[in-house]
Image: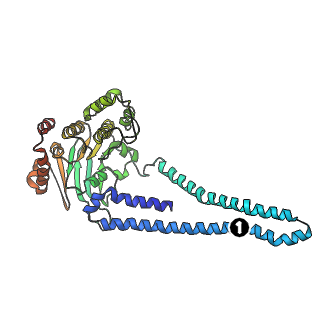
Amino acid sequence: MLLAKEEVARRAGAPFGGIRDTIACAAEDRAVGDVARAVDDEVALTRSLARATALRSLIVFIGGQLPLVVLLAAAPWMLREGHLTFGEVIGAVTYLTVSLEPALRSMVGVVGSWGIDLVVSLGRLGEGFAEPEPPENGSALPADRYDLTVRGLTFAYGPHADPVVQDLDLTVPEGGHLAVVGPSGIGKSTLANLLAGLLAPQRGTVLLGGMDVRQVCTTDLRRLVSLVPQEAYVFAGTLRENLTYLAPHSTERELTEAAIAVGLQPVIDLLGGFDVQVGTGGADLSNGEKQLVSLARVYLSPAQIVILDEATSNLDPIGEARAKAAFAHRQGILVVIAHRISSARRAERVLLLDGDSMHLGTHDELLSTSTLYADLVGRWDAPTSTRGPENLLRAVNV
């Protein structure tokens, strides 16, 4: 039953985590049906456990009452033969009914219910906290190649769903800068997860340094590829502990350089330095400040491929421009899921996701060849045309 509960959470979490992709693929009914089947399985197992518990309670009750029945049946003979006195019979009946049967029922209930539940739960927790083992066929990446290549990449959220990504071919050389754009719900975050090796494609491969990411040692993959989502996480501890989580041997100078590069230094100064304590989830920080902490953490890390999935959405245009410029000048590959036109303009190449098709080119090339891209640019530009900071943004972009 515990495994069934976990399965319900797993099946419900997948479509809710990718709700935009689920809606874009018109897979709502399939997602609901998949979760409903898991719920039905849990209900069936819960009823089965309830029946087993009721049967066990009946058996315990009969077992507890059986000695009393035997004693009462044998009492006339034992009294007549002088083996027991009347007082001893009364004492034995009292002991069996008041002490032994309730104690037996409690012991079996605790061991058979709470005890088993505790053992199973601790076992599952132990499996969850155990250090994950790298794949048996995992191999170390070559130390001199960190290019990213995609060949025939295809992914769908189910055998009958339309592919979110279909037959994508793409090469991002080491040091390259790619922006991924497209309408909301088109599959940009799904592509980010595929590139990071967090989702397995139905067809095609993602190659890192010429090696399929599914064959790369997990330790190497997580060290060299960093996906920064929109929901930045700050854990309880000092800012220093948060920033050095992926690079524990960083020096004070490296910490300061990373903070300055992504625009976090004013926050550090305001809070009182790197050793100030922050609460769980960064309760004392704004959403934008939490994103800056997350960005500085990855900037300081050894990651050679950084994927920013709307990781600057809570920053103002100037702050976003500063952070992305820092990553663009940082060694390695930068892939940006763009939500502002400035991100696409700064990128060397732009990948436009357009449902059934995909288009790759520079900003100017897509602007002249793709109606969808021109429409996106028009919608992005419209809100900023009347803003005062636009001139500042142009200055930062330059």
Q: Is residue 372 left or right of residue 279?
A: left
Residues 338 and 249: in front is: 338
Q: Residues within 10 Å of mark 1 (few under 14, many from 20)?
A: some
Q: At which x and y percent is residue 351? A: 19, 51
Residue 348 to residue 165: above or below: above
Residue at coordinates 30% horizontally, 55% vertically from top-left?
A: 205
Snapshot colouring: rainbow
Q: Secondary structure at mark 1?
A: helix
Residue 185 sits in quarter: bottom left
Q: At which x and y percent is residue 184? A: 22, 55
Residues 195 and 27: in front is: 27
Q: Is residue 205 left or right of residue 109?
A: left
Q: At which x and y percent is residue 4? A: 47, 62
Residue 182 to residue 291: above or below: below
Residue 69 sits in quarter: bottom right
Q: Amino acid at mark 1?
A: Gly
Residue at coordinates 29% horizontally, 55% vertically from top-left?
A: 190
Q: Residue furthest right?
A: 81
Q: Residue furthest top?
A: 253
Residue 92 sits in quarter: bottom right
Locate the C terminus by quadrant.
top left
Residue at coordinates 51% horizontally, 62% vertically from top-left?
A: 1
- Decide if residue 242 is in sight here: yes
Q: Is residue 113 left or right of residue 282?
A: right
Q: Residue furthest left?
A: 368
Residue 222 to residue 105: above or below: above
The residue to which callout 1 is attached is 63
Q: At which x and y percent is residue 77? A: 87, 72
